Amino acid sequence: MINTITFDGERTSVSSSGNTEWFKFTITTTREITTRSAKMIGEVHGMGGQDFSCQEEKIGDKYVYNCKATCYCD
């Protein structure tokens, strides 16, 4: 099976105390993946967190996952 995955993400904010970070990222694939897989890909790129959400849409022959994560660091 061939699947091309593109990842584009950024840290959108950090709290003044530095213990909370917010991330958003987009994953584009040629094959459908699960939300759990999208979360794991975000974690691999340092954008994991305790709160996670992801919206999936199909655009042509691509699957696009728009995700957000919040990391609470102690």
Image (tube, rainbow, N blue to C red):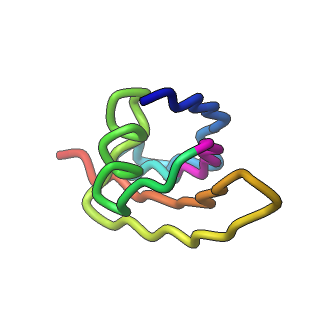
Residue 8: x %, y % from top left = 67, 35
Residue 16: x %, y % from top left = 51, 49
Question: Which residue shows up at 42% across the image and 40% down it?
Answer: 42
Residue 41 lies, with reference to residue 69, above or below; the image says above
Question: Which residue shows up at 30% across the image and 43% down it?
Answer: 40
- In magenta, the rendered stretch is 23-30
In the picture provided, is 11 more to the left or to the right than 17?
right
In front of the other: 59 or 55: 59
Q: Please tell me in which quadrant of the rendered image residue 11 appears.
A: top right
Question: Which residue shows up at 41% across the image and 47% down it?
Answer: 17
Instruction: Quarter of the image for the N terminus: give it.
Output: top left
Q: Please tell me in which quadrant of the rendered image residue 56 appears.
A: bottom right
Seen from this angle, which residue lies furthest left? 74
Q: Please tell me in which quadrant of the rendered image residue 52 appears.
A: bottom left
Residue 45: x %, y % from top left = 43, 27
Question: Which residue shows up at 33% across the image and 67% down it?
Answer: 51
Seen from this angle, which residue lies furthest front? 1
In front of the other: 21 or 23: 23
In front of the other: 70 or 9: 9
